[in-house]
């Protein structure tokens, strides 16, 4: 005659069902909150300070003759030049009226950056009717180094070690805010 | 009797439901993946920039993500500062049927005789600056000398791609007169 099985053994085989309903409620609430508050409007920015100068700074410039890279945008061409003739002025004609050849501008500026790796500033002077899309396009070409560009090395001011540069001329300043 | 069998099977159905439980585990997996994805994108979008209907922002390859700041939105129809329309442009005759922006300032909106400054924008910027400075005076945050933190003077400019540089430089000139010395030009992030 068989004995009755132990109740302790039977109790161990019982399955525990986790109550997921409150966790599910929390998840749904969290998703709703995130959907309402998340911004799917991905914007980036290009920073530019208002140009400020003084008589002292102007006198220093005349004696030091810095590069002061300047970029003039007209309806027909883009001119890249230096007021102190540190580089030969380059005229890049626009393929279409009001649409600068940003690739040619970028390539020329990469060549200048190789000669002046520590220079970061560029003065912009667009013509009044240039549209915002043109400005952003040229500023992108002027500021960012692409992966296909030749590597340019510059000395890190804090460590003193030569490092590959990530930006071309990131400090864009508008030089004709009060008129042409 | 097939008819009676059918009724009896229907009557037995409630007995089958007795032990039925909805399998929530797979649904939980899906929800957790969605929450993780949203939290990840939530962490990268730290600004509250908004836009207006009909705005066509240019695409930019700049890697800089703008921190939150005051912003002015310019479309060929109007100018908005901090979600408040401050002026409306005049539609020019040349724009009829053309793809150009075709807008102009109303005479009353520009300072005369030079015409460099935009009066409604200047008023709005001064008001915002005074508000920001008042908040800084009341705030507990102080600099090394115990003075209130200085006004940053940053203005984000979000312009339609058809807006002309002449308008943008008027905005910059007006903002600089109101104490805003740093400008951030916004564009749509270019997909990698």
Image (spheres, coloured by chain):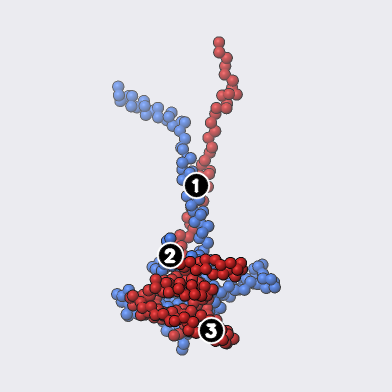
Chain colours: A red, B blue
Question: Could you tell me which secondary element the residue under label 3 belongs to?
Answer: loop
Q: Position of residue B176 (x, y in %)?
A: 53, 79
Give coordinates of residue B56: x percent, y percent.
39, 68
| Image spot of residue B60 (x, y percent) | 43, 67
Residue sitting at x 37%, y 79%: A77
Secondary element under disc 2, as helix, strand or loop, is loop
Can you tell which of label 1 and label 2 is closer to the viewer? 2
Which residue is label 2 attached to?
A: A148
In-image side of B100 versus A142 (left or right): left
Q: Residue at x 51, y 63 (%)?
A: B47
CA separation, marks 3 and 2? 32 Å
Count of labels in the image: 3
Q: Residues within 10 Å of mark 3 (few under 14, many from 20)?
A: some
Q: Nearer the viewer, residue A117 or A8?
A: A117
Q: Which mark is residue A65?
A: 3
Mark 1 touches mark 3? (CB < 8 Å): no
Considering only vertical position in the picture, is A72 above or below B10?
below
Question: Residue beneath label 1, please?
Answer: B32
Q: Is residue B140 above or below residue A90?
A: above
């Amino acid at each position: 005659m068989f004995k009755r099985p132990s109740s302790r053994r039977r109790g161990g085989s019982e399955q525990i069902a986790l109550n997921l309903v409150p966790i599910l409620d929390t998840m749904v609430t969290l998703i709703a909150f995130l959907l309402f508050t998340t911004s799917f409007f991905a914007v980036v920015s290009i920073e530019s300070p208002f140009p400020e100068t003084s008589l002292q700074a102007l006198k220093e410039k005349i004696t030091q003759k810095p590069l002061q890279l300047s970029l003039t945008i007209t309806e027909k061409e883009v001119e890249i030049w230096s007021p102190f003739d540190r580089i030969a002025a380059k005229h890049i004609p626009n393929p279409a009226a009001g649409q600068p050849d940003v690739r040619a501008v970028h390539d020329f500026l990469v060549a200048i950056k190789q000669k002046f790796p520590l220079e970061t500033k560029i003065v912009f002077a667009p013509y009044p009717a240039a549209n915002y899309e043109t400005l952003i396009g040229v500023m992108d070409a002027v500021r960012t180094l692409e992966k296909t560009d030749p590597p340019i090395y510059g000395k890190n001011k804090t460590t003193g070690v030569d490092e590959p540069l990530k930006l071309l001329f990131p400090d864009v300043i508008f030089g004709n805010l009060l008129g042409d | 009797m097939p008819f009676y069998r059918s009724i009896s099977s229907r009557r037995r159905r409630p007995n089958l439901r007795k032990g039925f439980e909805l399998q929530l585990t797979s649904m939980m997996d899906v929800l957790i993946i969605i929450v993780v994805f949203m939290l990840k994108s939530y962490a990268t979008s730290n600004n509250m920039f908004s836009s207006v209907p009909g705005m066509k922002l240019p695409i930019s390859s700049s890697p800089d993500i703008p921190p939150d700041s005051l912003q002015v939105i310019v479309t060929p129809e109007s100018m908005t500062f901090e979600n408040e329309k401050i002026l409306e442009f005049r539609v020019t005759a040349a724009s009829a049927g053309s793809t150009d922006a075709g807008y102009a300032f109303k005479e009353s909106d520009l300072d005369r005789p030079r015409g460099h400054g935009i009066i409604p924008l200047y008023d709005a910027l001064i008001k915002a600056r005074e508000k920001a400075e008042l908040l800084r005076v009341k705030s507990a945050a102080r600099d090394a000398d115990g003075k209130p933190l200085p006004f940053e003077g940053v203005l984000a400019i979000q312009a339609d791609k058809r807006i002309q540089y002449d308008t943008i430089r008027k905005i910059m000139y007006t903002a600089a007169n109101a104490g805003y010395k740093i400008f951030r030009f916004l564009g749509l992030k270019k997909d990698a």
